[in-house]
């Protein structure tokens, strides 16, 4: 009663290509998250060291915002790169 759906080699190749692009896109996103976390941790350590070196009389509170900005740029860059591989629906 059940029929097996048979795919042509062209359809199989299309599906495999689609899965490869999805896997590559996810791998780029994961590396982006790792890079963003490293940027945040190292940036905050650097900002705290800069504040400690200035001493009690200095005003470097704005330095604590720099790691957030750098992390945003890292996430934006990796997101753009991953979106360039976006899988489009429909026949291609």
Image (cartoon, rainbow, N blue to C red):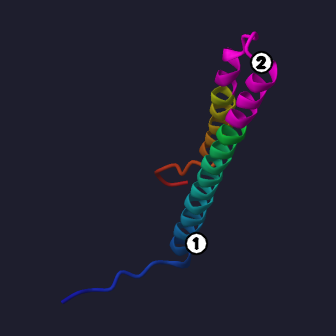
Give the quarter of the image for residue 84: top right
Pick out the residue farthest to the front: 56
Q: Tag 2's secondary structure?
A: loop
Taking 3 as reference, is 67 left or right? right
Instruction: Say which quadrant the C terminus sits in.
Output: bottom right
Taking 7 as reference, is 35 left or right? right
Q: Is residue 13 above or below residue 73?
A: below
Q: Earlier in the sequence, mark 1 or mark 2?
A: 1
- Stretch in magenta: 43-66
Please give the name of the residue rendered at 75% of the width and 33% of the height, measured from the top-left corner.
Answer: 46
Q: Is residue 87 above or below residue 55?
A: below
Taking 12 as reference, is 46 left or right? right
Along the line of sight, the residue nearer the viewer: 74 or 11: 74
Image position, residue 27 (x, y; %): 62, 58
* Magenta-colored stretch includes residue 61: yes
In front of the other: label 1 or label 2? 2
Q: Which mark is residue 13?
A: 1
* Magenta residues, dominant SS class: helix
Image position, residue 16 (x, y; %): 56, 70
Please give the name of the residue rendered at 54% of the width and 51% of the height, measured from the top-left corner.
Answer: 87
């Amino acid at each position: 009663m059940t029929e097996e759906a048979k795919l042509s080699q062209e359809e199989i190749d299309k599906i495999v290509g689609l899965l490869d692009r999805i896997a590559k896109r996810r791998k780029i996103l994961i590396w982006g998250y790792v890079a963003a976390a490293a940027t945040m941790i190292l940036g905050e350590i650097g900002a705290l060291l800069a504040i400690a070196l200035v001493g009690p009389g200095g005003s470097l509170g704005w330095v604590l915002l720099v790691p957030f900005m750098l992390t945003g740029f890292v996430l934006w860059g990796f997101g753009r790169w991953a979106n360039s591989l976006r899988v489009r629906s429909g026949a291609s």
